[in-house]
Amino acid sequence: MTTAPQRIVIVGGGFAGLWATRALRDAPVSILLIDRANHHLFQPLLYQVATAGLSSPDIAAPLRHILRRQNNVEVRMATVARIEPDARRLHLDDGSVVDYDTLLLASGATHAYFGHDDWAPFAPGLKTLDDALLLRRRLLLAFEHAEAETDSARREAWLSFAIVGGGPTGVELAGTLAEIARHTLKREFRRIDPASARVRLIEAGPRILSSFPAALSARAQKQLERLGVEVVTGAAVEAIDAQGYRSGGAFVPARTVVWAAGVAASPLARSLGVELDRAGRVRVLPDLSVPGHPEIFVAGDLASVVQDGKPVPGVAPAAKQMGNYVARVVRNRLAACPAPPPFRYRDHGNLATIGRMAAIVDVHGWKLSGLFAWWFWLAAHVFFLIGFRNRLSVLINWAVAYWSYQRAARIIIGHKAASGDNESVDAG
Amino acid sequence: MTTAPQRIVIVGGGFAGLWATRALRDAPVSILLIDRANHHLFQPLLYQVATAGLSSPDIAAPLRHILRRQNNVEVRMATVARIEPDARRLHLDDGSVVDYDTLLLASGATHAYFGHDDWAPFAPGLKTLDDALLLRRRLLLAFEHAEAETDSARREAWLSFAIVGGGPTGVELAGTLAEIARHTLKREFRRIDPASARVRLIEAGPRILSSFPAALSARAQKQLERLGVEVVTGAAVEAIDAQGYRSGGAFVPARTVVWAAGVAASPLARSLGVELDRAGRVRVLPDLSVPGHPEIFVAGDLASVVQDGKPVPGVAPAAKQMGNYVARVVRNRLAACPAPPPFRYRDHGNLATIGRMAAIVDVHGWKLSGLFAWWFWLAAHVFFLIGFRNRLSVLINWAVAYWSYQRAARIIIGHKAASGDNESVDAG
């Protein structure tokens, strides 16, 4: 056919896309990695940027830099508009067109408001660095607004925070926010007592952290409550606006609501023309390819994989394993070797952090909570952070934060408010 | 009259305002410090944030945190709209009103386009953290655009950078940008050679760094040229648009133009109703008070002070000295002691950094350039950074950058482009 090397296009530089790219470093292929950001993001620590513990560069590294020595890869910062599977072609937002022999779609997930997209401006989610900086600005500004407010009801509404969704992200945000209110801001305000802030974590299901065993969920809830979080389970949110939210028919004033409840797959999957699951993820074949298109793979949060009757969770280790697996399928095909056995997710366990010195761990049946679990969580996360410099910087920030309760990144930026942000920053 | 303590309002938490606030810590006064940001900014290192060497929290600290133990001060994040000197009253942007007994106006300077405000969107300046992040995004995106561009003339325009103004900020930006193009981005692109980027520093006067002796200026220019910067002196810029700039009648394509040429005083000064100099600064009396209003002081970049026939420069040490001096005048008045002698700026010398291992120093007649000057500059700047944690973080970032040429903060944020930014970040 042609003597040019196989052209492999990988959409998304997250865990799935980046791990696949690196696993193909010695393959006789020409890779184009497309991402709309210029960086790989260590998403498990994104909540730390939102809560001013870390700064953006601590948890992000430029894709070009990570891959600079891998000569078979080209990085392009661009947004993919749609896919033409039959023509083996991608259309980019800027009008240009990219052809491929093999495609790996790993564009991940975004937050979903379950048909209530009008809630988005009042309850931002947390998926990108921009989201994190918007959230940081809102959280810090709420205390500034409360300090400037003379009406006591309005002041209380500024000091009322609600986090919708009791999964890992919601729990991390609630625990950290309570710590900020009770410790970090101590002595800094003259008219309000930041410790009087109410932080509510609202979960529609019967318990928080439902992917953990019930006993660990219960211990996590106790730890959260000890940090000062009010945990409300079995409570669906019925409405959200700029003043607060409604749940169980009652309106709760809360000027700052954060959405940690739902994720939906990247809308790009729709242009594949194949079957999607309820969350918009692609139902892939056992080798992670798309039915009818053996040259198209889907990996990471965008892939719907059922294993032993349960869905493979949307976590970083699963994405990395899928990325590595797709690379293996591609390499075997190129070498005319038999296909590897179907993809199997190896679950090494489940960690969730709750706040200062509090976490839960469920690793190979080994169940921990509290201080020791927190140290375990910390070691695992620092170890997996990409890039030596980032690890060191994160460790230093955490060591300082641990001893002083101080948070290094408590800087409000973005005076020219980003779209979706309905607060004027200059308004005191 | 009243038994309440003197109400002192300080507008601006920069070097002048913050130093005055701290110098009044034991005075029997009630201080309100108003700033539109929540942080004190170490402006001398702002160019490092713009050029991705440092992240925002490295050079900024929350004002509330710095002042948390000073019980006679209240911090308010707000923008002052205007002053009513006769009523001793300030009007804030949010409509509220603040009364004072004594006012210190230290709201600093902003960039000025000398009657060409239409150039602002095409040639952003560098005064705030938001400016720095906008500039960082533009600089990094220019290389991304060049990589995606197929037309060679358009590609060259993306790889053409112009910095207007050969003062310290312009020199720092030009030197660092040349280092990024030649070293930091090495090997990271496949279609362009970042080292082929042209960095032009355009100065209308006969030489760059005109506040230094001519011999040091000449040495600085040599060092810049060795780093790869084209220095153009005696060249006024006549027009700037999205495609480039015009100088000496010739149009030069340059998609990225940075404004480092002019500063103007904060427009707030106009509402004082007193005489301003050409740059909009307040001509203050020898005790830094305003003619006709002994209860209003002006300090920092907003004050026009002439000493021995020369204007006191708009640098951090001068601002700190003015802030301390105003605090002394206020304390003496409260204690019914004689006023201190007129303000005198003690000039400890002049430093400018040029780039990697290159700087010039003029301290008490001691003139240095090159590597040793650079070490001197580095030590002085790290020493004066507020907050132990910031110093440590800056030192680590610099050490890593020094050995690896890498820049920690090369992260493009702000997909939802800020107002004033006419580039779409997603456009590849």
Image (cartoon, coloured by chain):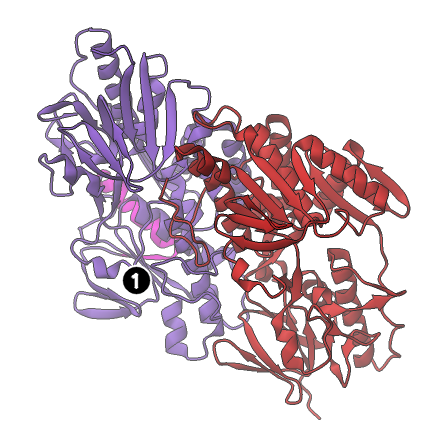
Chain colours: A purple, B red
Q: Quadrant of residue A346?
A: top left
- Residue B108 visible in image: no
Of B348 and A28, nearer the camera is A28
At 37% from the left edge and 18% from the top edge, which residue is drawn?
A: A72
Residue position marked by numbered label 1 in the rendering: A122
What kind of residue is marked 1?
Phe
**Subunit that carries the residue with mark 1:** A
Of B11 and B52, nearer the camera is B52
Of B179 and A176, nearer the camera is B179
Query: Residue B47 in the image: x percent, y percent?
Result: 62, 47
**Relative to B201, residue A385 above or below:** above
By secondary structure, the bulk of the magenta-drawn segment is best described as: helix
**Relative to A6, residue B146 above or below:** below
The question of residue B28 being in magenta is answered with no
**Left or right: A355 with respect to B312?**
left
Query: Residue A333 in the image: x percent, y percent?
Result: 20, 11
The question of residue A229 being in magenta is answered with yes
- Bounds of the magenta span? A212-231
**Left or right: A51 with respect to B257?**
left
* Quadrant housing the N terminus of chain A: top left
Tag 1, which secondary structure? loop
Query: Residue A334 in the image: x percent, y percent?
Result: 23, 10
- Residue B11 visible in image: yes
At 45% from the left edge and 38% from the top edge, which residue is drawn?
A: B154
Label 1 crowd bin: few (<14), some (14–19), many (20+), radius 10 Å: many
Q: Quadrant of residue B376?
A: top right
**Relative to A180, residue A299 above or below:** above
User: Quick one: which residue is furthest to the front in this view?
Assistant: B249
Q: How many numbered discs?
A: 1
Query: Residue A125 in the image: x percent, y percent?
Result: 31, 52
